[in-house]
Image (tube, rainbow, N blue to C red):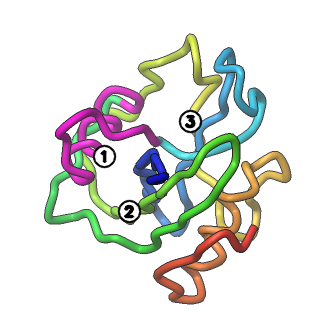
Amino acid sequence: MKLTTYVSVYLVLEKNGKFLLSKRKNTGYRDGWRSMVAGHLEEGEKAIDAMIRETREEANIQINREDLKVAHVMFRHEDRAYADIFLTCKKYSGELRNNEPNVCDGLEFFSLEEFPENTVEYVKTAIDYIKKGVAFSDDTL
């Protein structure tokens, strides 16, 4: 039987040596935990386009295709199989704002050394891999 895999994109947005994290709420999945601006690809959507869309929808900012770089791809299993694409970006335009207060309890920048303890584990793992220059991980959580 062929595996169904869900593809998600994550924004590793850096500003002044700090990285943007969101705080989840009312989602039913790790509410109260920190993650990143992220989302699933929609049918027929390209990963970069999904990241641009999710960033605008969630954080009210515009990022450009040429400023996004693939930093890490993670294949993992939880309740289902995921292929997570972590994209770094250092430039954006617009005013950063939480556009989804019903599912996000705020957006805040943190240094890598000060990531909150309640950061989702696989997000922490991906950041560690990115710092080490590891491009791919497969169920190493």
Asked if the residues shown at circle 1 and circle 3 are in contact, with their CB atoms under 8 angstroms apart, the answer is no
Sequence order check: which comes first, mark 2 or mark 1? Answer: 1
Q: Secondary structure at mark 1?
A: helix
Q: Secondary structure at mark 2?
A: strand
Rendered location of residue 36, percent (x, y):
54, 46
Sequence order check: which comes first, mark 2 or mark 3? Answer: 2
C-alpha separation, residue under disc 2 versus residue under disc 3: 17 Å
**Magenta-drawn stretch contains 40:** yes
Asked if the residues shown at circle 2 and circle 1 are in contact, with their CB atoms under 8 angstroms apart, the answer is yes
23 above or below 118?
above
Relative horizontal placement of residue 70, taking residue 109 as reference (left or right): left
Residue hosting label 3: 107
Residue hosting label 1: 51
Neighbourhood count class around disc 3 (C-alpha, 10 Å): few under 14, some 14–19, many 20 upward: many
Q: Amino acid at mark 2?
A: Leu
Neighbourhood count class around disc 1 (C-alpha, 10 Å): few under 14, some 14–19, many 20 upward: many
Which marked residue is nearer to the observer: mark 2 or mark 3? 2
Q: Amino acid at mark 1?
A: Met
Q: Amino acid at mark 3?
A: Leu
| Mark seen at residue 87 | 2
Q: Quadrant of the C terminus?
A: bottom right
Q: Secondary structure at mark 3?
A: strand
Relative horizontal placement of residue 68, taking residue 20 as reference (left or right): left
Rendered location of residue 138, percent (x, y):
60, 73
C-alpha separation, residue under disc 1 versus residue under disc 3: 16 Å
**Residue at image coords 59%, 38%:** 22
Chain part drawn in magenta: 38-59
Determine the residue located farthest toward the right in the rendered image: 117
